[in-house]
Image (tube, rainbow, N blue to C red):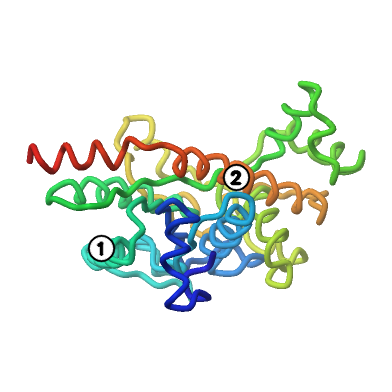
Amino acid sequence: MIWEYLREEEFSEAVKISKGVCVIPMGCLEMHGQHLPVGTDILHSSYIARKAAEIEPVCIFPDFCFGDVQGHTLHKGGIVLTVELIQRLLTELCSEIARNGFKKILIYNGHGGNNFIIPNFIRSTQHDKKDYVVLSKNLELITPYYFIEQIDAGRRNSFPELNDEDIAAMRDYVAREQENGHGCFSETALILGSYPETVRMDRCDAVNGLSTHKADYLDSAGLSNSTRFWSIQYPNALMASSFAGLSSRIAGASVRVAAEQLAASLKVLKDENQILKWNDEWNKAW
């Protein structure tokens, strides 16, 4: 159920079917090398959320595009809002979602930088009495390592999309030490499997995706527990080794697995009956 597709009289039934669960896809707008769109992190998280809702019906809220990309002002296409504004927007949006009857709100996050802001936001919701709860889940990249581990464990039939050529390509990828995190093989697969028209595979190596290692000394000293120096390590907004062999079949399997993983979490959230009771108890004791 897509929030903006619903008519007013359909919301009560949507709350009932979803058991009060509403998902906010959250990403950001920032460069992902030159082969992926700046909206990568919100595009794949939103697409996967909608696919998961086809498996386990919940309500999907309009995309939250403006995640935390502090300091990422070197490249065009990015949108950088203050942390304070992002927090305020999340606060008011969650309040409005709850006012419409959805008391279990899940932020489905597709951007690593949001891992700093989302926990703080959720903690802030505990400062005042609220009749709803907010949880979060990160989109996990479905890596070649995952596929090969599953296949080697005897689960080859779990991936009917893949052929021998695909598996060979991923085995080759796993055999080599890889940069895998931002605009990488795995993230490219998710976009190729959701919005293929936005991907330029011929531009995968247009910029260097390897670390400069300039800030390694801070890591070694335990002094880089933030994203502040990420753009020093990866000045091209790409964290990826060169790769080959990524097919539409791998892309489709990656999206399917990600959607199934999210759907499994949504089923738990729909079926459980404790967190709102715990929230009520906390409100009474507050």
Q: Position of residue 252 (x, y in %)?
A: 76, 53
Quadrant of the image containing the N terminus: bottom right
The residue at the far bottom in this view is: 7
Q: Quadrant of the C terminus?
A: top left
Look at the picture and state if 18 lies above or below 257.
Answer: below
Residue position marked by numbered label 2 in the rendering: 141
Secondary-structure class at tag 1? helix
Whether residue 230 is situated above or below residue 159 in the rendered picture: below
Q: Give amino acid for label 2.
A: Leu
Which residue is painted at 75% across and 38% down in the image? 173
Q: Nearer the viewer, residue 203 or 107?
A: 107
Question: Camera-side residue: 233 or 47?
Answer: 47
**Image location of residue 186, percent across then percent down:** 66, 48
Q: Position of residue 5 (x, y in %)?
A: 53, 75
> In the image as oriented, which residue stretches furthest toward the right?
164
Q: Which residue is mark 1?
A: 95
Is residue 204 found left or right of 65 in the rendered image?
right
Residue at horizontal 28 percent and vertical 42 percent from the top? 276
